[in-house]
Amino acid sequence: MVTPFPLWRDVCRFTRRLLPTFSLSWILNTRLLVLAVGLAGAGLPVALCGQDFERVPGTVIGYIEAPRRVFNEPMFPVYVCDPCIVVLPNGDYVATHACFDWGSSAKTSGTTWVYRSSDKGETWTLLTRLEGILRASLFVHDGDLYLLGPEAEGKAANIRKSTDNGETWTEPIDEFTGKLGLGRVGTPGTPVVHGGRIWIGAGRGFISAPVDADLMRADSWTGSNMADGNKGQPFGDRWLNKWGEGQVVAAPRTQVYVLPMIRNLQNTALIRAQNPKRVDFDASAPDAFPSLPGADKKFGVGYDEVSDKFYALTNPVLKIHEGVTTAALTRTGAAVVSSHDLIHWDVEKLFLYTPNIDSAEFGEGFQYFNFDFDGDDMVVASRTAFDVGDGERKPPRGHDSNLMTFHRIANFRQLKPEFVLVLDPATGRVNRYEKTQYMDAPLGAYALGEDFAEEPLGKVVAMGAADDGSVYLCEDGGRTLRFDRMGNFLAVVDSAPVKLGTGPLEVEPPEPGQRAWTRAGSGDWAELDNWFYWGRPDTLEETVWLGSASGEQCSVKMDTLFAVGGINFRNPHAYVIEGAGALSIGGERGGELRVVEGAHRINVPVTLAADTVCAVAAGCDLTLAGPLDLAGHTLTVDGEGTLTVAGEIIPAGGRLVVRGSSLLSFASGATLKPGCELVFEPSNVTEWAAGETSRLWQAAGPLAGKFKEITLPRLPKGLSWDRSKLYPSGEIRVVHSGEARSEDADVAR
């Protein structure tokens, strides 16, 4: 039985609110009644037999009854915590959990339950219950099974070993048999072996031991200091200094890091092990706090050798649940997230969702995931709060877990979202959902924006998807609209090339690296929630779509450097990228700046990371108001619209290529730094004749600076280029040989 403690103090809080109203004798009698009811129904670990777990997602491993409530207050609550799972060398799975809250003995002597499955997680057997160990990390080393965690809340760490796959365990007696004497071990995680040592996360630091040492001896282990984020952190008032529960991770190509959750922020921190005794962390470094969806709660993380990627299981907050309770307590969705470098993280898939966020009655949630790899699958242990049909014994909140559940994520290296569009016949709106292992997760309206082709979206009566990923929505007024996979409006069409219907429509996710702005107005580039599927663009392999989401001029604030492969603008209302940050453009396949609709501005400095094409459609405009650093690359100005340069052009060995069909415009104040080359490569001229004129650029006034070199097409014999009007008008003309004048001669006159 789990022993309740300070009973009288906690019973008092249930009746404290009644003091102004009722007599002392009534209050005392009520307290005695509450105490009796609480003692009769204190949370106890129970057997699984006879319980109805049919609705519970996954497979139930362990279960503790949710506490009874009096005046809606939980009595002597005991909850499941700290799940761990490991795949044994023989293929069996072992999982563990502890329990917490004031109805448990966690503050005096921790309790951990050990389970095993010999059929790949289909069924589980309780092997034993261990006293004197809490929040323990479970791992296999040299064929033996270990548990390492504190004896109780705030106490020093113990380690225990099993040589029979979890059946029996050693007892920590002294510093030679498992009493390590290390404090601050904290929450469990998955240890890693790197550089000849085994490392375990401990809050914002590590403990570690040589791989060939006797892990049961206290003198084998070394603890590090804790990282300090108070100096130089970039979050201002949002920084609560509540960060910890760090998870250790490493790859052969990296050093050892611990990644903590950070309360109130969708960020983690990259805390590096400098040596076994010291961590290295600079809170002001550019990549000190990588964005990670759902990292405001504890998450599980690990490295997969096959894909050479890092994976994490987190709790991003769906928009439908934003603001219902705190983000830290919103655990209704669970996601698989991946990264190649621990800095840039992508959501691969939501694998669990429940609509039952915390309410006055109860709440559900999945959290504190721990996982291991079994071939192509990820095997997961979750601390789960779920209504198992207990009536009033439902979990009070999603945080208050009554279960440890097992989940298998099959073929995790090939994951992608499974999106479904659902047409609401009553409203005519189309909403996007994602299939999960439990309920479909609502992701909001499919169409990004409200007005399309100068008209509001009407009531949708039918929809369909084409092989190229385009989605067609037919309104009750007869108009048919085409959208891309992310929901950006593309065009009004005469008819859809596919059969339309009203049933749920499965649609493919965007191609990897495609990122769409989804906020209906101005916002911060850095905020994950402003982008489709939390996909903030921040690598040179990603392409940005600033499309139909905004119904007005939109300021996209950028306060730090972001690197992307390219940006596409498609909206009659202006997007303005501005702030104290900067943009780097161009990936392995080159860079692109494209404007399909509207007039847009980039006010931050732009640096080319590869040869880049700027294609502006007819009637459209793109203004680069900040410095443009070619950085030795080529910027090709294409299309039939206008590229306006308002800042300085820094060539650094680079060049500008103009096609002639587009217009390169220099605003007043534009400056050419020395060394820039201009190349004229017309796209629509095959033969030249005397008298033909081309404009390479236009300028609002005298152009500050000149091109180092201007390369023009070779002309037939007898013809030459007249460049006398090149500065400032940008005009060149084909003349007969002997009539040509250079821009220098023209200036000399």
Image (spheres, rainbow, N blue to C red):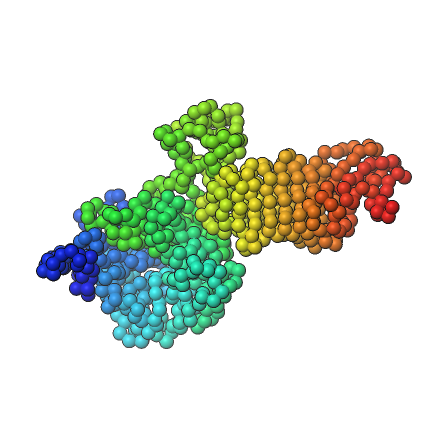
Q: Is residue 168 left or right of residue 188?
A: left
Give the answer, above or below, for where 407 lies relative to 469: below
Q: Between residues 423 and 347, which one lies in front from this camera angle?
A: 423
Give the answer, above or below, for where 324 lies relative to 210: above
Give the answer, above or below, for where 340 lies relative to 110: above
Where does the image place residue 392, in percent across and percent down from the top left? 19, 48
Q: Residue furthest right?
A: 738
Name which quarter of the figure residue 697 lies in.
top right
Q: Is residue 284 left or right of residue 636?
A: left
Q: Is residue 700 left or right of residue 36?
A: right
Where does the image place residue 311, in percent across and percent down from the top left? 43, 53
Residue at (72%, 51%) from the top-left corner? 672
Residue at (83%, 42%) from the top-left corner? 724
Where does the image place residue 545, in percent across and percent down from the top left? 53, 42
Q: Is residue 406 visible?
A: no
Residue at (56%, 41%) from the top-left corner? 574
Residue at (38%, 31%) from the top-left corner? 427
Where does the image place residue 584, in percent across and percent down from the top left? 60, 51
Q: Is residue 381 left or right of residue 198?
A: left
Number of labels in the image equals 0
Q: Residue furthest front?
A: 20
Question: In the picture, which quadrant includes the N terminus?
Answer: bottom left
